[in-house]
Structures are given as C-alpha cells and as structure tokens.
Amino acid sequence: HRHPVGAYLWIAFVMTLSIAWHASGESLAGARPGRSVLWWAASAAMMSALFLMGSRGPIGATILVMLAILIVARRKGLVIAFVSLIIAGIAISAVLSGRFQQERALEKTSELLSGRLPSADQHRYDIWRVAMRHIVQAQGKNLIVGIGPRSVSTIYYDRMQFEPPLVMESGYLTHAHNMYLNKLIEEGIVGLVSLLFFFGVVIMRLVRNIRDKATDHWRIFAAIGGIGIPAI
C-alpha cells in the first residue's frame, strides 16, 4: 500500500538527510572525503522517488518534521540543503512522471475545483467510519487486547448500516488508514497505550537534549523524524 510504504521511506529520507548533513561537517566518526556525496545523492534519490509516489500524508508530515528539525538546528546551511532537495525532487519527478501521474494530477485538480471531496479522501473517511462503528458495536469486547495483529481485514462492513451510505465499494479492509485507530482495534488499549508510552519516552529524551543544547548529532534529527512522521 502506498501510504505506509511512503511513511517508511520518508522516515528513511529524514535519517539519510541527517547523516548527509553531519557527514558534510565531518562530525561522524571516521568521515572520509566523498562520503557525504553518497548520502546527499541518496537523499536526492529518495526525495524524487517519494514525490513520484504522490502520497500527501507523508509529504505533509515530512515538511512539518523538517521544520521542527530546522528550528532545533538553527543552521542556515541545512535550510538551503532541504530547499534544494525539494526543488531537485520536484524537477526530477516532473521529468520522469508518465501519463499515469499526469492523469492523476488532472483528476485531483478537477475534484478540487468541483468542490467534491477527493476520491482518496472519501475512501479514507469511509474507512474511519467503519473502524469507529466496529469499536462502538463491539461494546467493549476485545477492547483491552484487541482482535489481533493484522486483523482489520476480518471486519466485514457489508453487514453494517451507514447513513449516509458508504461511497467506497464493498469488500474488506486492509488497515484503518489511521495508526491510532488501527492499534486500538488490533491490539486494544494495551497496544495503543504502549505505543503512546514509547512516543512519550523518546519525546522526553529529545526535550532533555534540546534543553541541554545537545542536538548536534544525526541521531537527534533521525529520532525527530522517526517519531514525528508516524505520529503525525
């Protein structure tokens, strides 16, 4: 599925960009001449590939995360590097995009101009309605430990009644299109609280490092990306 894969790749992009930036400053142990060039090339390749995927959620999350990193780092060079990668990614994806991407762009534009909810957003909204209806109809059953990992596909919404009716076609789900809803359904309160606890621990460590001004390390930037993108 495009959205989960896009999220993973954007996390990898933030980590790669962080390593490239610090390798350029030779703050990485054993940094060698030319090493940073490979990291920058990898960052540009990821940026181009992910623009071609056209997944708006990860793109928006990455922009917010990079803004947070830029605020923490306060380095003009990093701002220039990130903007340059965006320009390079857009240019390369524009050159490589085929007829499918062009038709998709025209479809999105026409949907926005007509005032209709874009088809992908309508599909996502319907899935959220199904997920919430499942939780309500369960009446507390499986609320503690959930229905099991990767089990959202066992929810058959053909048996549910919705008003207004769902727009998406009948069938079965693959995921809830929302990490927190997905966690609550499949792993219950235990899984959701565990996830939030993990996020909280990392965020507290990041806040401590920022407060102590110990942020000049690629792992700090990577941690912001690793937590920020999936959390958003």
Image (cartoon, rainbow, N blue to C red):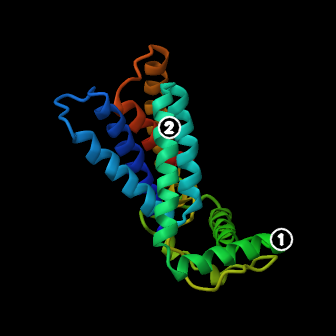
Q: Give SS at disc 1.
A: loop
Q: Earlier in the sequence, mark 2 or mark 1?
A: 2
Mark 1, residues whose alpha carbon is within 10 Å: few (<14), some, or many (≥20)? few
Instruction: Determine contact: label 2, label 1, CB under 8 Å.
Output: no
Q: Residue at x 50, y 28 (%)?
A: 76
> Where residue 24 appears, x then y in whole percent?
31, 33
The residue lying toward the viewer, choosing from 148 and 6, is: 6
On the image, the x and y values in percent for residue 94 come to 52, 67
- Determine which of the numbered discs, if any, sits on residue 39 in the image: none
Tell me if I can see residue 190 in this picture: no
Q: Residues within 10 Å of mark 2 (few under 14, many from 20)?
A: few
Q: CA distance from mark 2 to mark 1?
A: 36 Å
Q: Amino acid at mark 2?
A: Ile
Judging by the rendered image, the residue that carries numbered circle 1 is 115
Q: Is residue 164 left or right of residue 95?
A: right
Q: Amino acid at mark 1?
A: Gly
Total residue callouts: 2
Question: Where is 83 relative to 5, above or below?
Answer: above
Is residue 173 shown to the viewer in this render? Answer: yes
The kind of secondary structure element at disc 2 is helix
Q: Please provide percent x and percent y for residue 61.
A: 56, 49
Tell me what residue is drawn at x 56 percent, y 65 percent.
176
For the residue pair 125 and 188, the one nearer the viewer reads as 125
Q: Which residue is mark 2?
A: 80
Residue 50 vs residue 38: left or right?
Answer: right
Among the 4 quarters of the image, the one containing residue 156: bottom right
